[in-house]
């Protein structure tokens, strides 16, 4: 197939990292466009390096391309330098594989991982010359479909999408694409297809619904505009993750990307039930991949990519029951190949440190602890099953084994937080530093002293968590809390060993608004985009003042979405979605949080969250 690049050499020479835009990487899929029935363009609305690191797109890309009648291509957000050139020269956004305009595709699928990408979604549509509002699209425009974690509250961006796929993509996409083909063959139009799509499990068509509001701005009711549209959309879930599609020939980029390694997903879901964590609720129940299947994938992935590092992906790797068996196999296989094994999301305990000692014979990089809160009381509120004793013992074992750098993650602004909790962050950091000096004799301190890096992020209440009812702090409150934390650290004996980092407060406030927002936010997002907001998650590109003026000019009150605690019976914008965990369970957990009562993890005792009805995973161990 003759392949002509969409950008001239003259343009490619003007932009940073031209390899972002030329495609043709190892394992990318080329097909004859005349030989397929459906062309699907998969989009990650951020730069190439971040999008290429996303496993979800690699899974769907490979799965779609395994079907003879479908050609799936990729597109990412052009960085600001190319964005400017494309607008000036009216070059339409193009897919990497064919280098043809995205607007020529049948589908544009956008994965929405993070609220701060919402203006980038508009950039993708705009540069592709696709009308921004779904209602303005014609028969010639692609069907724009959204998926990923942010689609669990799609309302702030609902008007920009034709449909959303709620849940895991492996189950219903074949059905959706067949429905599209059949509709086309029978001479059906765009609306006919959307009506048929709305009958497929997990598919949400925003066009068929509207909200009615009370005078106070909360939702009064949700009205259907198409009588056959479902009242509730239940998430799609893969019940057997060992027997599902997995990409053993992922696309290998020419340039270094954020996660420059092979990714092996060992399980989905998490047994822990931390009350602030959205992923822990959305991906219930925990489903483990079979160890033998994972061993086979390991060999195939390394053979097909040439990477020298493999990362085990899950929300809590220590909880994977076959971890020892898998690692023993990987260590013998990977050592022969000089391949590194990386293990994110481990709990710091004797078992995990033993695991890390096995894996990190050579390179002792930093260890990460995430206590989230400094006091036992507040850790109980958030249901973080971790005691101070666990943390200090873990640190002692780590220091004895030769680690000298520890990263600590805390959250500021959690429900019921007191000044004592804030100052306690410095105290706990100091105690960990003290453990180093108590544990490691002077003559064994090879790298001099210990380094503790303490980081705080600001608490953002998310949909489908027990804290979806909680109030969120204002920007000034957040900044004051960070100031108090720093003061607490500066007053410690071992302050020279502690480095403190904190997150941007105004960015967190905006993320909080978008996370729990409703359809009234669409015009604000569009206004901010039209005024130049783009790549909002990049601090050098974030313009808070533009966002604030956009809210003001659209007559939308920012505080309405953040600083009020929700009533127990309030109808939330996302209540029509069913993620498997019931609202009753979340409310029960919210009340337990307010009383400081913890809940055991899924393996210890079932809490009746509702996910058992999927008939799989940890619920049936």
Image: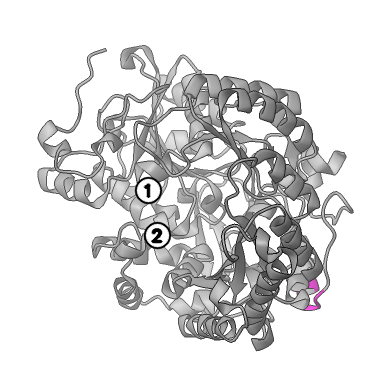
Image quarter of the C terminus: top right
Q: Is residue 48 magenta?
A: no
Q: Which residues are magenta?
A: 592-596
Residue 537 marker:
2
Where 486 falls versus 291 (above or below)?
Answer: below
Seen at 52% across and 63% down, the residue is 515
What is the image's colouring? Answer: one colour
Image spot of residue 555 (x, y percent): 36, 77
User: Which of these two is toward me, 608 or 244?
Assistant: 244
Inter-mark Cα distance, 2 to 1: 9 Å
Quick one: label 2 or label 1, which is nearer the N terminus?
Answer: 1
Mark 2 lies on a secondary structure that is loop
- Label 2 neighbour load within 10 Å: few <14, some 14-19, many 20+: some
**Looking at the rendering, which quadrant does residue 242 occupy?**
top right
Using the image, tell me which numbered label, if any, was put on residue 46.
Answer: 1
Instruction: Name the element at disc 1.
Output: loop
Give the label on residue 404, or none. Answer: none
């Amino acid at each position: 197939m003759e392949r002509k690049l969409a950008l001239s050499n003259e343009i490619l020479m003007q932009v940073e990292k031209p390899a972002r835009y030329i495609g043709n990487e190892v394992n990318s899929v080329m097909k004859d466009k005349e030989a397929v029935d459906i062309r699907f363009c998969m989009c990650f609305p951020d730069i190439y390096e971040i999008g290429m690191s996303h496993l979800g797109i690699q899974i769907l890309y490979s799965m779609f391309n395994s079907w003879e009648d479908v050609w799936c291509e990729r597109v990412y957000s052009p960085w600001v330098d190319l964005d400017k050139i494309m607008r000036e020269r009216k070059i339409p956004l193009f897919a990497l594989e064919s280098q043809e305009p995205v607007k020529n595709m049948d589908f544009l699928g956008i994965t929405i991982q993070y609220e701060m990408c919402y203006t980038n979604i508009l950039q993708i549509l705009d540069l592709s010359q696709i009308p921004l509002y779904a209602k303005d699209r014609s028969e010639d425009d692609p069907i724009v479909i959204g998926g990923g974690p942010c689609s669990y509250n799609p309302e702030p961006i609902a008007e920009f999408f034709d449909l959303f796929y709620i849940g895991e993509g492996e189950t219903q996409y074949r059905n959706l694409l067949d429905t599209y083909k059949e509709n086309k063959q029978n001479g059906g139009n765009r609306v006919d297809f959307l009506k048929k799509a709305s009958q497929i499990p997990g598919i949400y068509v925003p066009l068929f619904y509207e909200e009615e509001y009370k005078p106070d701005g909360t939702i009064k009711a949700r009205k259907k505009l198409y009588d056959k549209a479902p009242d509730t959309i239940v998430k799609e879930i893969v019940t057997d993750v060992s027997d599902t599609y997995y990409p053993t020939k992922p696309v290998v980029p020419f340039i270094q990307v954020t996660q420059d390694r092979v990714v092996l997903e060992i399980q989905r879901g998490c047994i822990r039930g931390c009350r602030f964590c959205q992923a822990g609720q959305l991906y219930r129940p925990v489903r483990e991949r079979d160890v033998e299947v994972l061993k086979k994938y390991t060999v195939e992935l390394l053979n097909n990519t040439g990477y020298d590092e493999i990362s085990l992906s899950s929300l809590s790797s220590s909880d994977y029951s076959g971890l020892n068996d898998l690692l023993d196999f990987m260590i013998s296989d990977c050592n022969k190949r000089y391949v590194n094994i990386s293990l994110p999301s481990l709990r710091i305990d004797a078992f995990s440190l033993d695991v890390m000692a096995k894996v990190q014979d050579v390179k002792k990089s930093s260890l990460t602890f995430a206590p989230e809160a400094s006091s036992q009381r507040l850790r109980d509120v958030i249901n973080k099953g971790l005691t101070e004793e666990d943390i200090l013992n873990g640190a002692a074992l780590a220091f004895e084994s030769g680690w000298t750098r520890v990263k600590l993650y805390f959250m500021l602004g959690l429900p019921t937080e007191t000044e004592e909790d804030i100052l306690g962050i410095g105290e706990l950091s100091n105690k960990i530093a003290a453990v180093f000096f108590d544990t490691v004799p002077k003559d064994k301190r090879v790298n001099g002293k210990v380094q503790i890096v303490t980081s705080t992020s600001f608490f953002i209440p998310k949909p489908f968590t027990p804290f979806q009812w909680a109030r969120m702090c204002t920007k000034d409150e957040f900044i004051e809390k960070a100031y108090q934390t720093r003061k607490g650290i500066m007053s410690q004996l071992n302050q020279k060993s502690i480095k403190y980092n904190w997150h941007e407060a105004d960015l967190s406030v905006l993320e909080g608004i978008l996370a729990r927002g409703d359809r009234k936010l669409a015009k604000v997002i569009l206004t901010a985009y039209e005024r130049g907001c783009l790549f909002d998650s990049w601090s050098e590109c974030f313009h808070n003042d533009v966002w604030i003026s956009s809210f003001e000019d659209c007559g939308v009150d920012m505080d309405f979405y953040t600083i009020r605690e929700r009533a127990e019976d309030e109808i939330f914008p996302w209540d029509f979605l069913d993620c498997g965990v019931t609202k009753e369970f979340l409310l029960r957990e919210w009340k337990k949080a307010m009383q400081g009562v913890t809940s055991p993890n899924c393996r210890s005792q079932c809490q009746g969250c509702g996910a058992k009805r999927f008939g799989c995973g940890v619920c049936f161990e």
